[in-house]
Amino acid sequence: MTESDRLGTASGGAGTRSRGGRPRASSRRTLEDAASELFLEQGYARTTIDQIAQRAGVGRNTFFNYFAAKSDLLWLDADETISALPEILGAAPHDLAPSSALEHVIVALAARHPHRAVPIALSQREPMATHEEFLAAGLARFLLVARELADFLRRRVDDDVDANSVRAAANAAAAAAATGAGAWALAGVERGDLTVAVAAAVAPVCRGFAPVLDRPGR
Amino acid sequence: MTESDRLGTASGGAGTRSRGGRPRASSRRTLEDAASELFLEQGYARTTIDQIAQRAGVGRNTFFNYFAAKSDLLWLDADETISALPEILGAAPHDLAPSSALEHVIVALAARHPHRAVPIALSQREPMATHEEFLAAGLARFLLVARELADFLRRRVDDDVDANSVRAAANAAAAAAATGAGAWALAGVERGDLTVAVAAAVAPVCRGFAPVLDRPGR
DNA sequence: CGAGGTTTCCGTACTCAGTCCATAATGAGT
DNA sequence: ACTCATTATGGACTGAGTACGGAAACCTCG
């Protein structure tokens, strides 16, 4: 159950198998491994889904049974981390002001990320089209995180706080976090700690939104 | 020259025609109009590039001569506004602190946008895939704006300010602006002023980054 | 006027991601 | 054994984006 429900994935995780039905073969990991190998050998752009499925010894349609798009393969590690966000949101201490809680959960999420997991698309020379595809797929992750952050904030904030301000805070903080994470990922082999990069980027945003979010009345 | 160079567009504007060569037919506007009609009639998803080209009385390849992707048609108005950003950056008063200048230029850009121009993809019921395609294409615009803002900031900021902080500020401010613009676009027929929506979203970010950006030394 | 040169236009053909559908396989529950 | 739910698989299809080659239109220089 480590890999709860993925993103656009057609319910890739076998978390909630009600009962019955043909059991999933272990195709998911096989597909991931085949894709990783091929990406290292030929790069992402020059690897087709047919090749991945063929090397995994599986039909082409089975690929789409596990992944909604080819670009999902570029975000496997990030998805793993992101899937822990709800748990982190639930465990956030209640004595923090909303702006501080926002900063806290983002840093906690970054701390959860395995240190070596940097997307394949960045560690290899890829054509520009691949880079754009990578970013577009990342946008979906960004929006998912930002939505969860906004919901989290909305629950913690006084009722008279503008809903648009809440979303602006969540999106701006998420963008700052993404910037920090991007800088971390693009740094050389001796990149520092992801947590500090993210924290440094997010802190100013949360400070700026503190007057807006933290108990404007009372 | 109103429409300088577009985004991925294969140099759509006839701004820098060195000399010679077959003159462009007036295909660009014809294609835009044909696309608008078809989008209203059938929606974006159910409209193929073949149909657009055919209605415009033009070959299919000519379409890609003017637009790099189908999704570019969803951002024509926004691109028009964004193309004014360099001019706005150049005209920003020099007596402003960097964080205030950042806020100023973003609001000025929003003020430049025509009040009625809201993307077609939002004013019509479209399948989710279209929405995602729309957002992915918007990401390219976002990154373009954020990069220009970061360059602008880097020029205005003291040398000892961390480059990553500069990019975080630019990205967070751009994300806040995009959030405000999105809320504005999604609001009903009686949406208020884009400028105030963007200003309200961006102001806290700039306030938060002020201690980081504005003369840390001296 | 003609000869390059350059750019746009157009048709054709191709690759490949993603969708749809019908069918078989595999197990659980009864 | 029978049903039901789920997965696996194969085949066919759509449509975006690319590549290439050649024709048309206009320029400038001789």
Image: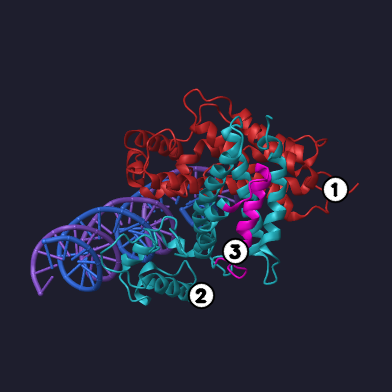
Chain colours: A red, B cyan, C purple, D blue
Q: Which of B36 and B15 is in front in this view?
A: B15
Cβ–Cβ below 8 Å for labels 2 and 1? no
Q: Is B96 a magenta residue?
A: yes
Q: Mark 3 lies on which chain?
A: B
Q: Which amino acid does label 2 sit on?
A: Leu
Cβ–Cβ below 8 Å for labels 3 and 1? no
Residue drawn at (67%, 72%) of the image: B189
Q: Which of the two marks, 3 or 2, is nearer to us in this view?
A: 3
The x and y percentages for residue B202 are: 68, 50
Label ID, residue B40: 2
| Residue B22 in view of the camera | yes
Q: Mark 2 lies on which chain?
A: B
Residue B199, above or below A116: below
Q: Which chain carries label 1?
A: A
Q: Mark 3 points at which residue?
A: B113
Q: What residue type is labelled 1?
A: Pro
For mark 1, give the secondary structure.
Answer: loop
Cβ–Cβ below 8 Å for labels 3 and 2? no
Q: Which of B177 and A182 is in front in this view?
A: B177
Numbered range of the magenta stretch: B91-119
For the residues tagged 3 and 2, is the chain the same?
yes
For the residues tagged 2 and 1, is the chain the same?
no
Residue drawn at (64%, 50%) of the image: B93
The x and y percentages for residue B26 are: 36, 73
Please give left or right for residue B182 compared with residue D25 in the image: right
Label 1 crowd bin: few (<14), some (14–19), many (20+), radius 10 Å:
few
Q: Where, quadrant-wise, is the N terminus of chain B in this rendering?
A: bottom left
The x and y percentages for residue C21 are: 41, 64
Please give left or right for residue A179 compared with residue B215 in the image: left
Q: Which of the two marks, 2 or 1, is nearer to us in this view?
A: 1
Label ID, residue A216: 1
